[in-house]
Image (cartoon, grey):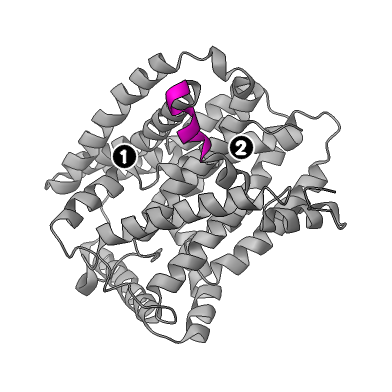
Amino acid sequence: MKRIEEIDALRGFALFGIVMTHMFQGFLASIVPPEYIGFNIIYSIDHVSKFIVEQLFVSKFYAIFSMLFGLSFYLILDQKKHASPAKFAWRLILLFIIGFVHHIHYRGDFLTVYAVFGMILILCRKLNNRIILILGLFLAFNGPEIIIKTVALFSKPIPRSELILLKNIRIEEARRYFDLIIGDDYLKLFISNSTVGVINKCHYLLISGRLWVVPGLFLLGLWIGRKKWHENIHKLNLKKLIRITALFGFPLIGIYYYFAVTPYSKLGRFFGYIAKDAANIFIPLLYICIVLFLYKLRVTQNVIKQFIPVGKMGLTTYVAQSVFGIFIFYGYGLNLLLELSGTMALILGLFVFILQVWFSKWWFKLFKYGPLEWLWRCGTERKWIPNNINK
């Protein structure tokens, strides 16, 4: 199956945004204890960097990655009448194993999440396009959480004492985890990630809404594949799509930001979160349209093509980013979590990504698949697959 360059470029672009987000956050994957809030705000410019990352990066690039995962499902399984769902399920099991090894070192891993939610795609394979689209939109816009929050508006509020207790429990757990991050005891962190970290990840998926959003994005990616948009990119009116997504996306960010920094009522908080979830769909769509538009322009096409090699080895690139981040920030590495400003972390993240672009270009001159992609493919096929470009 011939690879689609634009899809690889989008995947590489998403990985750029992901590493920049994680670098600014110090690869924490946790709430920050009160005494460490603002740990990466050292210089005045860090406030600007924080605003940009929080409003334009957080939750935006993983959304692109998630939609591309759904599209990949279509390319691998859904478009092929006689393709084996069992083989795809085995592929997801292997992804879960790779992800769990990643997770016990970095709690922010999303490979395990993709592996579990990917099974939903197999179950939805027989649904028609209209149901896929409706269900995908409902979940991607965090519809179940909107219903829950709507009911909560008219329900008896949880006693303040219980809320304070729950908050204190979360803060204490965050303190323990933060201490492990800045400590140098690898074994303790390993054990924590393997036990408490799994529970915390499940809790995060629920409270963040990603329990619904990720499967929804998968389904939208599947729907895009079924509509053959990836084969007819040249026919899309990208300028119009850019205007539409920007027209919705940026005002939604403004609405959420207003409610995030201004004291507001329960109703105001409700609308603020709805705006946030909606922005996390429109802004990624805007980014996708911009990247595809720039790819079509002769003057910028070569710039966008730089994302293709890292996109082709997306699994390797993603895991390698975590290896670097852990080494930079964690106590058993260079322990720079409390030393590096957010802006400097972003500059360092850009440097890392440029190195990954260079490495991936070099790699694909010699090999067909990225290192982890090759192992994953061998495991999926259950046989040794030659990777040398000359074989």
Q: In percent of the image, x 57 and y 54: which residue is there?
A: 359
The image shows residue 155, relative to residue 300, as above or below, that is: below
Dot 2 corresponds to which residue?
70
Per the rendered image, the range of residues in magenta is: 298-306
Q: Which residue is mark 1?
A: 276
Q: Of helix, strand and loop, which one carries label 1?
A: helix
Neighbour tally class for label 2: few under 14, some 14-19, many 20 plus, Cα within 10 Å: many
222 left or right of 122 in image:
left
Where's residue 378, x and y in %? 80, 56
Which sits in the foreground, 35 or 387?
387
The x, y position of residue 181, in whole percent, is 39, 77
SS type, badge 2:
helix
Q: Quadrant of residue 326?
A: bottom left
Q: Say above or below: 53 vs 35.
A: above
Q: Amino acid at mark 2?
A: Gly
Left or right of 3? Residue 169 is: left
Q: Amino acid at mark 1?
A: Lys
In the image shown, does 8 or 186 lie closer to the viewer? 8
x and y, in percent, of residue 320 in the image = 54, 61
Residue 55 drawn above or below residue 7: below
Residue 183 in magenta stretch: no
Q: Quadrant of residue 203?
A: bottom left
Asked if residue 216 can be seen in this view, the reply is no
Give the position of the N terminus as an image quadrant.
Answer: top right
Circle 2/circle 1 CB separation < 8 Å? no
